[in-house]
Amino acid sequence: MKDLRWTIEDMPELTGKIIVVTGGNSGLGYESVKAFAMKGAEVVLASRSTEKGEEARTEILKAIPGGKIKVMQLDLGDLDSVRSFSTAFRKNYKKLDVLLNNAGIMMSPYFQTKDGFEGQFGINHLGHFALTGLLIDVVLKTPGARIVNVSSGAHKRGVMDFNNLQFKNGQEYTPMKAYGRSKLSNLLFTYELQRKLEAAKKETIVAAAHPGIAMTNLARYLEGKFLFKILIPLFKRMAQDPAMGALPQIRASVDPEVKGSEYYGPDGKNEYKGYPVVVQSNKASHDLKDAAKLWEESEKLTGVKIPVAQD
C-alpha cells in the first residue's frame, strides 16, 4: 500500500508554493528544505545563524542547482528576532502555503532565553506560538495553507503544571521533564489552533509530526554523558537517518490527503523508525482545559495573540 511506503517520490509538485522551515540549516529541517526545493517550492530557510543557513543553502543547491531557497535570520529564543523575521517576511511575501515549525532543542541543562523563558519551553513552544501568531493572517489569506508543528514521542513523558510551568529558577527541573512538557505543548497548541480554525470556518489546517528516533544534532546535550556513550551503539541501531526522520513532517506539510489535527510518525515498532503514517498522541495532548490554559498563558507570556477569525 502506498500509505505504508510514502516517500518524497510521493510528494506533489510544489512550484509556486512558499514554505517557511524553522531550523532549516540542519537535521530534519535541512532535509525538509531540500525536499521542498526539489519539488519546486520557494523555501525560506529560517536559521538562528545566517552563516550556517547560507552553508546549508549552498550544500542543497549543489544537489538542486535550480532550487529557490532564501535564508532569513530567526532566533526563536528571542521574541524581538521573531518579530523582525515576521516583518521581513511580510515585506518579501504576500502568501505562505506552509509554516513548518521544526526548530527545537532537546534535554538541555536549565537556562533562560533572552526573554526570561525556560529554554526548552521558550524555544520549542513559545517561539513558535509567537511566530504563528505573527504570520497567521498571511497563512489565512493563502488558499490551501497549513501549519505543521513538530513534536516528539517524548510528549508522553510531559506533564503540564501551570503552577510552575517554566520550572522557575530551575525548581523541579530535569532536562527530560522540560523537554516532554515542551513537546506536549506543541500538540496541545496544534489541536487547540485547529479547533479555533474550524470554529471560525477557516480552511487552513494544522497538523503535527514526530520523527521517531533520528540521528541528528538534537542530541548534542547528551553526547558528553557517560551513559549516552555506552548506549550509542544501541541508539544507532534503533535510529534512522535524518532523511527518513524528516518524512513525517514532510508528509504532514504537503500530502493533499492530510487532515487537520492529524499526527504523523514512523510506522515501525514503538514509532522509532519507518515510513510516515497517521499515529496517535496520548490522552493528555487532547485535554481541552490544559489546551485552553496553555493558549491563555502563551498569549500572556509572548504578548502575541492569534486572531483566527480574520477575513
Image: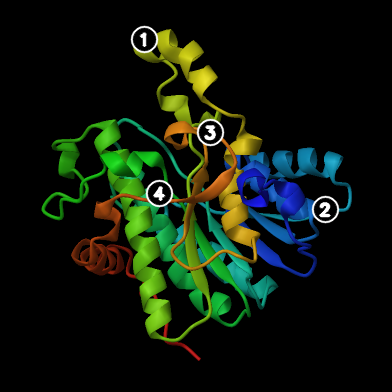
- The residue tagged 3 is 273
Amino acid type of the residue tagged 1 in the rendering: Phe
Q: CA distance from mark 3 to mark 1?
A: 25 Å
- Of badges 2 and 3, the one in the foreground is 3
Kindly state the secondary structure of the residue where label 1 is placed.
helix
Please indicate whether residue 13 sits to the left or right of residue 192 in the image. Answer: right
Q: CA distance from mark 4 to mark 2?
A: 28 Å
Amino acid type of the residue tagged 4 in the rendering: Asn
Along the line of sight, the residue nearer the viewer: 177 or 71 = 177
Which of marks 4 and 1 precedes in the sequence? Answer: 4
- The residue tagged 4 is 124
Residue 153, x across and y down, in percent: 39, 40
Q: CA distance from mark 3 to mark 4?
A: 22 Å
Q: Residue furthest left?
A: 163
Residue 88, x across and y down, in percent: 61, 67
Q: Residue furthest bottom?
A: 311
- The residue tagged 2 is 67
Residue 281's place in the image compared with 106, above or below, is: below
Which of marks 3 and 2 precedes in the sequence? Answer: 2
Kindly state the secondary structure of the residue where label 4 is placed.
helix
Are there few (<14), some (14-19), or many (20+) residues within 10 Å of tag 1? few
Q: CA distance from mark 1 to mark 4?
A: 26 Å
